[in-house]
């Protein structure tokens, strides 16, 4: 009996050892670390996020500044008194510096509009962010990204089109002060005077505007050969702090990458929000090359509070960082659905933006505007296949992801990122990092293992059969009729437990 038990245990051990050492044991290996939520969201949503551009052309006119003699004399007397009281030094440079500083505080007090009127043909514009909601080219962005109010447009032209005029006016003022007014601070302050004065007196005529998007090239980014694609305005709300949303349409599109819309109730205070877009701090700098800087940036931060304007327009306050140029960009929940559109931030008294004070128009307002035009957001086949491929890619199933990525490339040849994933998948397969399951692998794991198990169990049965001896037939169990009693054992007889 002991020998049979030892043989059986040994064979069972061999079977278990074979199973544990088989390729199937790899299935029990520890799981790889989870891909961060932000990484997945950025990969899934970036293809639908686009750089938008609004361009203006107009005739810009500003009058010639004429000094107001009475105001200048009064300012001169104040300067003399300041010298006498010791508030400023008596040297000419200090006096001139004080004079231009006072002028910069209120240029309109010291200069009036005169002739001739200076007219320049000027262009201006701005960059924002938009995102596809339908495969055939409907896009969402912010209202202030597609058309500025007159006052804002005047500021845009003043900052972009009057640089030469401002510099000339400042140079004339400095020259009129004489040879003593030569330090850099006086020159800078004089320039500031006319930046403000010319902006206050600007006139804009014959304005023409156009909207376009700079579609990313395969591999991501936009190079110098990329052409702007015209895009039409379909609907526009009221600029921030109103219902700052606009709907655009690019014609002749199909199979575009899209992002899904969520609901206002999908997020609440404390949840993490994710913003995608094109910050002007990057797109308008010379530090980075054009191929790399025109790719969406992804930021995240908490939902801080629900706000509402006096007119009843809802807004979400978040600490997710954003900058000019991010306007119009989608804001996502951790589930990857759009829960709002980035439209603005708080402005400090000195004109700078406040870090971590971004404001988001909830997606419910976006849906209202889409419904007005009977536009139904939909997932494209491109996006469906792309997301399936990404899940395989992030699971290291590169050979399974590869045909999916190629399917995406066939559906949308201008897809900005799929070519990169195809290349990365091929490199991963070559490097031996592929964890895809082959169709024959289950048979090798279960069929081959099952065969070994059958052979081992057969051997075990044979050994047990050889070790058995025939037993004598047991005596028949006594039949006791129902209701009868078994006779007690004879005196002196022994009983044993069965």
Image (cartoon, rainbow, N blue to C red):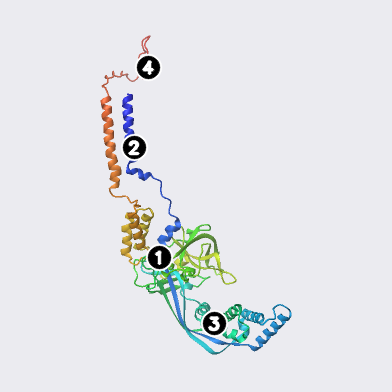
Q: Which residue is mark 3?
A: 167
Q: Which residue is mark 1?
A: 48
Q: Quadrant of the N terminus?
A: top left
Q: Earlier in the sequence, mark 4 or mark 3?
A: 3
Q: Secondary structure at mark 1?
A: helix
Q: Is residue 365 above or below residue 116?
A: above
Between the residue at mark 4 and the residue at mark 3, the CA separation in whole angstroms equals 121 Å
Characterize the local packing of mark 2: few (<14), some (14-19) or many (20 or more) Cα atoms within 10 angstroms.
few
Q: Is residue 147 left or right of residue 186?
A: left
Any mark on residue 496, and which? 4
x then y, percent, for residue 494: 37, 13
Image depth: mark 4 or mark 3 in front: 3
Label 1 or label 3, whichever lies nearer to me, is 3
Mark 2 lies on a secondary structure that is: helix
The spot of residue 192 in percent (x, y) is 58, 79
The answer for how far apart the CA atoms under marks 1 and 4 are is 85 Å
Mark 1 packing: few (<14 Cα in 10 Å), some, or many (20+)?
many
Work out whether residue 125 can be spotted. Answer: yes
**Residue located farthest toward the top when viewing the structure as drawn:** 491
Question: Mark 2 — residue?
Answer: 17
Q: Decide: marks 1, 4 in contact (CB < 8 A)?
A: no
Question: Do residues under tags 4 and 2 come within 8 Å of each other at their CB atoms?
Answer: no
Which numbered circle lies on residue 347? none
Sequence order check: which comes first, mark 1 or mark 3? 1
Q: Nearer the viewer, residue 42 or 23?
A: 23
Classify 194 as above or below 325.
below
Element type at mark 3? helix
**Structural distance between the alpha carbons of marks 1 and 3:** 42 Å
In the rendered structure, which disc, 2 or 1, sits on the residue that comes first in sequence? Answer: 2
Q: Is disc 3 in contact with disc 2, using a CB cutoff of under 8 Å?
A: no
Q: Residues within 10 Å of mark 3 (few under 14, many from 20)?
A: some
Q: From the viewer's perspective, is 131 left or right of 106?
A: left
């Amino acid at each position: 009996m002991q020998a049979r038990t030892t043989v059986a245990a040994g064979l069972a051990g061999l079977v278990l050892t074979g199973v544990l050492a088989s390729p199937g044991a790899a299935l029990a290996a520890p799981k790889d670390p989870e891909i961060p939520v932000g990484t997945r969201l950025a990969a899934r949503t970036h293809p639908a996020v686009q750089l938008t551009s609004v361009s203006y052309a107009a005739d810009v006119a500003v009058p010639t500044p004429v000094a107001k003699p009475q105001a200048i004399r009064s300012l001169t007397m104040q300067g003399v008194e300041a010298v006498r009281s010791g508030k400023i030094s008596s040297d000419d440079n200090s006096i001139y510096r004080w004079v231009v500083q006072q002028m910069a505080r209120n240029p309109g007090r010291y200069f009036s509009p005169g002739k001739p009127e200076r007219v320049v043909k000027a262009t201006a514009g701005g960059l924002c962010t938009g995102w596809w909601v339908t495969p055939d080219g409907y896009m969402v962005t912010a209202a202030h990204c597609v058309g500025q109010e007159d006052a804002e447009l005047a500021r845009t032209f003043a900052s972009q089109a009057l640089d030469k005029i401002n510099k000339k006016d400042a140079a004339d003022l400095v020259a009129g002060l004489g040879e003593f007014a030569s330090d850099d601070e006086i020159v800078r302050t004089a320039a500031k005077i006319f930046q403000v004065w010319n902006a206050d007196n600007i006139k804009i005529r014959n304005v023409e505007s156009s909207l376009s998007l700079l579609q990313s090239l395969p591999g991501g980014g936009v190079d110098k050969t990329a052409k702007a694609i015209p895009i039409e305005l379909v609907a526009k709300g009221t600029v921030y702090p109103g219902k700052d949303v606009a709907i655009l349409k690019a014609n002749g599109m199909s199979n575009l990458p899209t992002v899904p819309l969520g609901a206002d109730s999908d997020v609440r205070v404390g949840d993490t929000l994710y913003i995608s877009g094109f910050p002007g701090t990057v797109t308008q700098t010379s530090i980075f090359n054009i191929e790399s800087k025109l790719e969406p940036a992804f930021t995240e931060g908490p939902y801080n509070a629900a706000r509402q304007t006096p007119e009843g327009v809802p807004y979400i306050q978040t600490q997710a960082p954003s900058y000019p140029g991010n306007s119009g960009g989608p804001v996502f929940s951790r589930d990857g659905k759009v829960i709002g559109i980035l439209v603005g931030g708080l402005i400090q008294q000195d004109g700078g933006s406040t870090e971590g004070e971004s404001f988001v128009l909830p997606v419910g307002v976006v849906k209202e505007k889409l419904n007005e035009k009977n536009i139904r957001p939909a997932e494209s086949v491109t996006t469906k296949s792309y997301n399936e491929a990404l899940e395989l890619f992030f699971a290291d199933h590169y050979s399974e992801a590869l045909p999916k990525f190629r399917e995406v490339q066939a559906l949308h040849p201008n897809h900005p990122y799929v070519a990169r994933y195809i290349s990365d998948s091929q490199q991963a397969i070559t490097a031996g990092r592929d964890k895809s399951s082959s169709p024959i692998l289950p048979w090798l794991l279960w069929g081959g293992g099952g065969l070994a198990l059958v052979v081992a169990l057969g051997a075990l049965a044979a050994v047990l059969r050889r070790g058995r001896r025939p037993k004598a037939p047991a005596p028949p169990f006594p039949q006791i009729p129902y209701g009868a009693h078994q006779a007690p054992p004879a005196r002196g007889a022994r009983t044993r437990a069965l």
